[in-house]
């Protein structure tokens, strides 16, 4: 059964979508089968991989108009695409019974086919994010190593705690990913230290360094491994994925 992981941060520009794509691709590099779910109405994950508009997206599936139909990007890596139409989903579903569990029910049909399901959450804490947390085993929090990225962490933790208490007893913060890190910058080092003080061992040992290849890859509609596997970005995400596999497999054994 696949491990479902939500990437969550309601602050934009922290590397959430970049991390979702390259964690998925990195897991494939390690021999795993991964499904990426673009749950963001901006559809940045879908656009970054150059996937054309599909007849059936996560929007149609959430509305009950279609089943989940994964799009194969490459062997081992599939995507549930998004569309701008998803921006209206929260208002459309507000009166639906069991609206927090829609995504969980949809995943029941595909969860056996993958080792990991990675959900790219929208930069908000609304109904779509609530659906993602309700069906996830872990939450990963990408955090840019800048001062403003630290703001709002308490709110994220409060939301996760509420979902765990009311909707999903198994949910936990599985890791914190420090992104856009530059060892030469005192501010980056200080923020990384603050993250460690707040989250302790939850912080992954691998920091995602500030790397131009990570910004260039989406312009070529590729993940970092297909774009430049010799880059620091590829090295960092592969190292991060090894940590993810180690943590999740240890948890299963435990």
Image (tube, grey):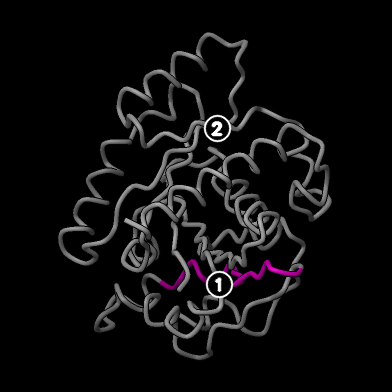
Q: Is residue 77 magenta?
A: yes
Q: Nearer the viewer, residue 138 or 181?
A: 138
Q: Is residue 134 magenta?
A: no
At numbered mark 1, what does the secondary structure look like: helix, strand or loop?
Answer: loop
Extreme residue in the bottom direction:
65
Residue 53 horizontal/vertical position (percent): 71, 75
Extreme residue in the left direction:
165
At numbered mark 2, what does the secondary structure look like: helix, strand or loop?
Answer: loop
Q: Nearer the viewer, residue 115 or 149?
A: 115
**Placement of the N terminus among the 4 image quadrants:** bottom left
102, above or below 226, in the image: below
The answer to whether residue 147 is left or right of residue 171 is right
- Residue carrying label 1: 114
Point 25% across, 80% down: residue:
98
Q: Residues within 10 Å of mark 2 (few under 14, many from 20)?
A: some
Residue 66 horizontal/vertical position (percent): 53, 90
- Residue carrying label 2: 206
Point 68% across, 55% down: residue:
25
The answer to whether residue 84 is left or right of residue 197 is right
**Placement of the C terminus among the 4 image quadrants:** bottom left
Query: How far apart in space, not on screen, are marks 2 and 1 (Cα)?
Result: 24 Å
Q: Give the image quarter of residue 37.
A: bottom right
Residue 76 image label:
none
> Reading the chain from its start, which is encountered first: label 2 or label 1?
1
Instruction: Count the labels in the image.
Output: 2
Point 68% across, 76% down: residue:
71
Q: Which residues are magenta?
A: 75-89
């Amino acid at each position: 059964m696949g491990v479902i992981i939500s990437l969550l941060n309601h602050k934009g520009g922290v590397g959430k979508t970049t991390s979702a794509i390259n964690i998925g691709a990195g897991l494939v590099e390690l021999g795993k089968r991964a499904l990426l779910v673009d749950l963001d109405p901006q559809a940045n994950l879908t656009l970054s991989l150059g996937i054309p508009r599909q007849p059936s997206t996560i929007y149609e599936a959430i509305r009950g108009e279609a089943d989940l139909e994964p799009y194969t990007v490459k062997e081992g890596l599939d995507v549930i695409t998004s569309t701008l139409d998803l921006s209206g989903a929260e208002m459309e579903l507000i009166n639906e019974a069991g609206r927090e569990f829609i995504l969980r029910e949809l995943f029941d049909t595909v969860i056996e086919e993958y080792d990991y399901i990675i959900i790219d959450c929208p930069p908000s804490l609304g109904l779509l994010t609530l659906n993602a947390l309700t069906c996830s085993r872990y939450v990963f929090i990408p955090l840019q190593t800048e001062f403003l990225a630290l703001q709002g962490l308490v709110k994220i933790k409060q939301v996760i705690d509420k979902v765990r208490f009311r909707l999903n007893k198994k949910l936990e913060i599985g890791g914190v990913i420090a992104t856009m890190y530059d060892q030469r910058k005192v501010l980056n080092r200080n923020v990384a230290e603050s993250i460690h003080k707040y989250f302790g061992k939850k912080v992954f040992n691998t920091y995602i360094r500030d790397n131009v290849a990570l910004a260039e890859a989406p312009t070529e509609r590729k993940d970092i491994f297909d774009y430049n596997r010799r880059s620091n970005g590829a090295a960092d995400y592969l190292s991060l994925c090894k940590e993810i596999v180690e943590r999740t497999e240890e948890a299963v054994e435990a």
